[in-house]
């Protein structure tokens, strides 16, 4: 893909603000200056058209429950034809290079992409025997009108640091540098979420 086509593909998916050189430079500086639990939270990240289209398709998907009581409960979203272009973009070298530019991290290899849905009663738990390795955790949120009292936030923990709590927010990209000392869980989605 030549430079013109690469830029057009980025512009298709990513809001123009986040493609500006000054913005990307500021994001990398902010990310690199955090001594522990380095993270970025980019609101309204996807272009308005693509975000609305993806939300429309996600609302029509089915999902399969996976529940292991002492570990987790969540739903695997069934991938449809309409979601394939977005997933291909996430897995592309083009998007990987973009993430490298705004984090300064040397990212290599193929990403692991999971489409998950959390509903009332879902959660993940901490486990001491979980294998943890350095990675950039990339989360796209398509949750509308979430209230903090519902639970359902992602929590990242590191030694002697305040926990990083990340609540669901529509069309938000979250990047967290997870190290071997980082633990992560998703807070139980409580009964109040059923009225949402």
Image (cartoon, helix red, strand yellow):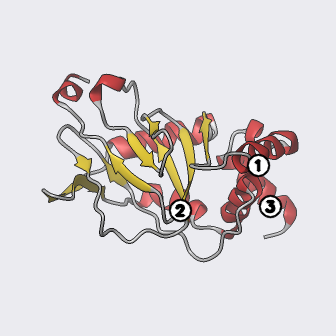
In the visual, does 173 lie left or right of 25? left
Q: Secondary structure at mark 1?
A: helix
Q: Are marks 1 and 2 in contact (CB under 8 Å)?
A: no
Between 89 and 156, which is closer to the camera in this rendering?
A: 156
Q: What x and y, as percent, mark residue 10?
A: 72, 53
Q: Pointer 1: what residue?
A: 28
Q: What x and y, as percent, mark residue 17?
A: 76, 36
In the visual, does 36 lie left or right of 31? left
Checking the image for residue 179, the label placed there is 2
Q: Residue at x 54, y 38 (%)?
A: 172
For marks 3 and 1 on the same chain, the one whose residue lies earlier in the sequence: 3
Q: What x and y, as percent, mark residue 196?
A: 26, 24
Between 86 and 102, which is closer to the camera in this rendering?
A: 102
The residue positioned farthest toward the front in the image shown: 160
Nearer the observer, disc 3 or disc 2? 2
> Mark 1 packing: few (<14 Cα in 10 Å), some, or many (20+)?
some
Nearer the observer, disc 3 or disc 1? 1
Q: What x and y, as percent, mark residue 125?
A: 26, 53
Q: Are marks 3 and 1 in contact (CB under 8 Å)?
A: no
Checking the image for residue 5, the label placed there is 3
Between 35 and 75, which is closer to the camera in this rendering?
A: 35
Q: Residue at x 64, y 39 (%)?
A: 47
Q: Secondary structure at mark 3?
A: helix
Between 194 and 153, which is closer to the camera in this rendering?
A: 153
Q: Secondary structure at mark 2?
A: loop
Asked where in the image residue 68 lies, by quadrant, the reply is bottom left
For marks 1 and 2 on the same chain, the one whose residue lies earlier in the sequence: 1
Q: Residue at x 40, y 29 (%)?
A: 144
| On screen, residue 38 above or below 189 | below
């Amino acid at each position: 893909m030549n430079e013109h086509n690469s830029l057009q593909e980025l512009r298709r998916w990513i809001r123009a603000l986040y493609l500006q050189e000054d913005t990307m430079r500021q994001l990398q500086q902010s990310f690199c200056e955090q001594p522990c639990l380095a993270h970025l939270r980019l609101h309204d990240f996807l272009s308005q058209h693509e975000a609305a289209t993806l939300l429309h398709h996600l609302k029509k998907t089915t999902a399969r429950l996976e529940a292991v009581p002492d570990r987790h409960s969540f739903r695997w979203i069934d991938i449809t034809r309409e979601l394939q272009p977005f997933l291909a973009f996430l897995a592309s070298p083009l998007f990987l290079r973009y993430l490298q530019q705004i984090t300064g991290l040397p990212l290599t290899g193929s990403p692991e992409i999971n489409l998950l849905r959390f509903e009332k009663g879902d959660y993940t738990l901490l486990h001491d025997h979980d294998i943890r390795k350095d990675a950039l955790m990339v989360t796209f949120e398509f949750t509308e009108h979430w209230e903090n009292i519902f639970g359902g936030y992602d929590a990242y923990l590191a030694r002697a640091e305040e926990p990083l709590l990340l609540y669901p927010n529509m069309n938000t990209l979250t990047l967290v540098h997870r190290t071997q000392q980082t633990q992560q869980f998703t807070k139980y989605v409580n009964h109040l979420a059923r009225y949402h």
